[in-house]
Image (cartoon, rainbow, N blue to C red):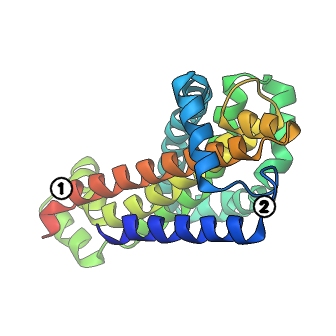
Amino acid sequence: MVALPLGIILLLGLWMAVALVGNYPTFILPDPISVFNKLSEIVINGLLWHHSQATLVAIVGGLTLGLTTATLLGYLLAKSPLLERLAGPYIVASQSIPAVAIAPLLVIWFGSGKLSKVLICALVVFFPVLVNTIVGIRSVDAGLKTLMRSLRANRWQTFVMLEIPAAMPVLLGGLKIGVTLSVIGAVVGEFVGADRGVGFLINQAKGLFDTPLMFAALITLASISLCLYLFVTRLEHWLLAWRQ
C-alpha cells in the first residue's frame, strides 16, 4: 500500500526536476503544477466528466460484449478440438490486423456514435480473454473430471461445480488483461472518429498545442485503468477466497 503513493511522489519529483532544469516551454513539457491546475479546471467546469462519461460507456459496453463472446467461444473451442482446428486459424489471422487499422472501417459502417467505439473496444478485449478461457478450461484436472463422472454428475453440474471454480484463476487473469486493454480500445475508437470522449479531448488538445490538457487527459485514462484493475483484483480475492 505504501509503494504506490511513494512511487507517485518520486515520479512527480523527477518530472518537476526535469521540467525546471530543462526550462521547457509549457507546450513541450508542462510541470506538474500546470497540469494539476488544468486538471482542476476541467473538473470544476464539468468538461472532464462530459468526456469521461462517453469513454466509460464505450469501455463498459466493449468489455461486456468482448468478455461474453470470448468466454462463450473459448469454452466451445476448449471442449471441441475439431472446432478449434476449423476456427482457430481464422481467429488468429484476424488478430494480425491492428485495431487502429480496422477502426476507420467500423466508423464508416456503424457511424461515429457509441456502437463503433463499443465494437472496437470489444475487438481489443476479445483475443486475450479467449485464449485465457481456453487455457483455463483445459487446465482442469482430468482426475477430477473422472471423479465427477463416477458421481454421475451431468454436464451442467460438472460445468458449475468443477470447471468454473477450477478455471477461475486463469479466467480472472484474462479479465485483468481485458479491462486494461478496454481503455486502449475505447481511446482508439475516439481517435478515429468521435465528438466526445477522453480520446477526442486528447486530439483536440493536440490541435491547440494545449499540452497540460493532454497530460490531464492521460492522467484520467491511467486512473480509469487503475480503478478497473483494482476492482478486478478485489473481485479476484472475493471469488477465490475459498482457495485459502
Quarter of image, res 229: bottom left
Q: Which quadrant of the rendered structure holds the C terminus?
A: bottom left
Q: Would you place residue 233 above or below residue 106 in this image?
A: below
Which is more toward the observer, 155 or 95? 95
How far apart marks 2 and 1 lie (CA) works out to 38 Å
Residue 206: % across, % down: 83, 42
Tell whether 111 sits left or right of 148: right
- Residue 125 picture location, percent across and down: 59, 50
Quarter assignment of residue 62:
top right
Residue 93: numbered disc: 2
Q: Are marks 2 and 1 in contact (CB under 8 Å)?
A: no
Mark 1 surroundings: few (<14), some (14-19) or many (≥20) residues within 10 A: some
- Which residue is at 86% across, 49% downward? 101
Q: Residue at x 16, y 68 (%)?
A: 243
Across and down, in percent, residue 71 comes to 47, 50
Of marks 2 and 1, the one in the foreground: 2
Q: Which residue is mark 1?
A: 153
Q: What label does residue 71 carry, if any?
A: none
Relative placement, left or right, of 53 versus 147 is right
Give the mark nearest the N terminus, 2 or 1.
2
Q: Which sits in the foreground, 236 or 54? A: 54
Residue in view at x 27 percent, y 66 percent: 166
